[in-house]
Image (tube, rainbow, N blue to C red):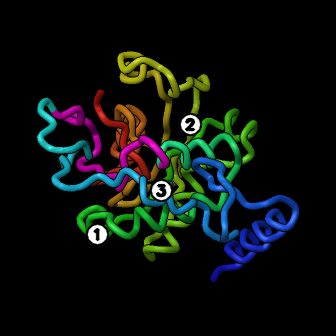
Amino acid sequence: MSAADLLLRARDELLAALAPPACAACRAPLARAHDPLCRRCRAALPWLPPPLCPRCALPAPCDPCPARGAAYAAAWAPLAHDGPARELVAALKFRGRLPLARLMAAQIAAGVPARLLDGAALVPVPLHPDRRRRRGFDQAALIAGALARASGRELAPCLRRGGAASRQLGAARETRLARGRLTVAAVGAVPRVALLVDDVHTTGATFDACARALRAAGCERVGAVAYARALRR
């Protein structure tokens, strides 16, 4: 166990001593402090069964594929952005349940296709600096760091967000997909093969902007992985 994991575990134990542990998804009391999910929520996790489209990560067939023309070559996610998985993402992003990043990374690592990891360095999708300052952390960076430790892959935080801090959450699909809405640039050297890491894959607009920045800086192949995939309604 790394020093960072030991510090997080010590923090969890201190918090558990001050307040009874609760399920990160439904907030029901937990019998075990080190388990972030109650038995009911763990059983209700919306795993995405195969077949999935290798390009957009939606259940196949996905015609027309929303990733046609995207700068990333492939995508994958273990869970649908629904039920307990949606609540876990919210608990990490908005309630600061930072240890959940390790759970998400472990669930990604357990099933991520080998073709995505092969020769790839992990590149976290960057949070806008203003939002990172307000939140105090970058959830994608936490997940990517934990995934790097779990998978043995290199971590390459080589992207930066710029421009206005445009809010993706709640934005219409057309607004999310508008070219130029997201400003992303590569900083320093980029890996030859990159695997973008984020918490949620919604329209693919953020992955596409990041992949375009990587490709413009010389990256040869870009894939994308997220903890949860938003499904078509």
* Magenta stretch, overall SS: loop
Q: Give the residues in magenta.
A: 65-84
Q: CA distance from mark 3 to mark 1?
A: 19 Å
Viewport quadrant of the C terminus: top left
| Image side of residue 154 versus residue 20, left or right | left
At 49% from the left edge and 36% from the top edge, which residue is drawn? Answer: 184
- Alpha-carbon distance for marks 1 and 2? 26 Å
Query: Which badge, 3 or 2, is on the more N-terminal residue?
Result: 2
Name the mark nearer the viewer: 1 or 2: 1
Residue 105 lies left or right of residue 229; in this view the side is right
Label ID, residue 161: 2
| Distance between mark 3 and mark 2 Cα atoms | 16 Å
Compared with 111, 174 (above or below) is above
- Could you tell me which residue is drawn at 36 percent across and 45 percent down? 80
Percent coordinates x, y for residue 31 in the rendering = 67, 68
Front-most of residues 216 and 58: 58
Numbered label attached to residue 216: none
Q: Amino acid at mark 1?
A: Asp
Residue at (19% x, 55% y) in the render: 50
Task: Give the percent coordinates (x, y) of residue 205.
Answer: 38, 31
Instruction: Label 3: state its secondary structure.
Output: loop
